[in-house]
Image: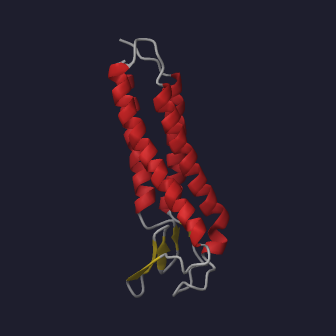
């Protein structure tokens, strides 16, 4: 039982780390001489970065991705704290339903963020407000980590739903 508990805790911490990295790191869309994410875009040639602001045509889409990624990360951290509290508060045989619900909300938020970015990436990167050409790029590792975090949060949410407290 102790090994299972350690595995669940490590799995949850990995999920949170993936969410933090994919939210913060600047590699959602990359090219030969640029990289961009949901916060800013940077040119490797001139070593300059420019914040993505409301002057961009698809700023509302970027804001939706930002908000849902932040919510996902917060929900994941809250779910971990609730799990730790439920370890000490639940009676034997009860399920970790509250932890599961919060973790599945985290899963839903990261899925929404990655889906919006997937759907809107063409419009996002064809904006004339960019100071350099970013349409000739491809998805970066932060975007891939967001989808991996979706799978991890889904699996851990289901694990918490199935898991019962034992002695």
Tell me if residue 2 comes above or below residue 73 in the rendering: above
The answer, for residue 19, to whether it is visible in the render is yes
Q: Residue at x 57, y 72 (%)?
A: 59
What kind of colouring is applied to the model shown?
secondary structure
Residue at the image point whose x is 49% and y is 61% from the top: 141
Residue 51 in picture, x, y percent from top left: 44, 77
For residue 92, above or below residue 97? above
> In this orientation, does residue 6 appear?
no
Q: Quadrant of the C terminus?
A: top left
Residue nearest the viewer, comparing 20 with 142:
20
Place of residue 125 in the rendered image (x, y in percent of width and height, measured from the top left): 60, 76
* Quadrant for the N terminus in the image: top left
| 12 horizontally vs 65: left or right | left
The residue that appears at 46% across and 18% down in the rendered structure is 164
* Residue 152 position within the rendered picture, expressed as x and y whole percent measured from the top left: 50, 41
Q: Position of residue 15 (x, y in %)?
A: 43, 44
Front residue (pair 136, 51): 51
* Quarter assignment of residue 79: top left
Q: Is residue 52 left or right of residue 89?
A: right
Q: Is residue 149 left or right of residue 78?
A: right
């Amino acid at each position: 039982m102790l090994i299972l508990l350690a595995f669940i805790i490590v799995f949850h911490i990995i999920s949170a780390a993936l969410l933090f990295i994919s939210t913060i790191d600047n590699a959602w869309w990359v090219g030969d001489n640029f990289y961009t994410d949901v916060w800013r875009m940077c040119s490797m040639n001139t070593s300059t970065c420019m914040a993505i602001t409301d002057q961009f045509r698809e700023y509302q889409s970027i804001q939706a991705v930002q908000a849902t990624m932040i919510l996902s990360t917060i929900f994941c951290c809250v779910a971990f704290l609730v799990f730790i509290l439920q370890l000490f508060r639940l009676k034997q045989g009860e399920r970790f339903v509250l932890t599961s619900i919060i973790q599945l909300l985290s899963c839903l938020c990261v899925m929404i963020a990655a889906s919006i970015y997937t759907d809107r990436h063409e419009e996002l990167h064809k904006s004339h407000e960019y100071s350099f050409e970013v349409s000739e790029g491809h998805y970066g590792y932060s975007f891939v980590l967001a989808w991996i975090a979706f799978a991890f949060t889904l699996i851990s949410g289901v694990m918490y739903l199935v898991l019962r407290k034992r002695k």
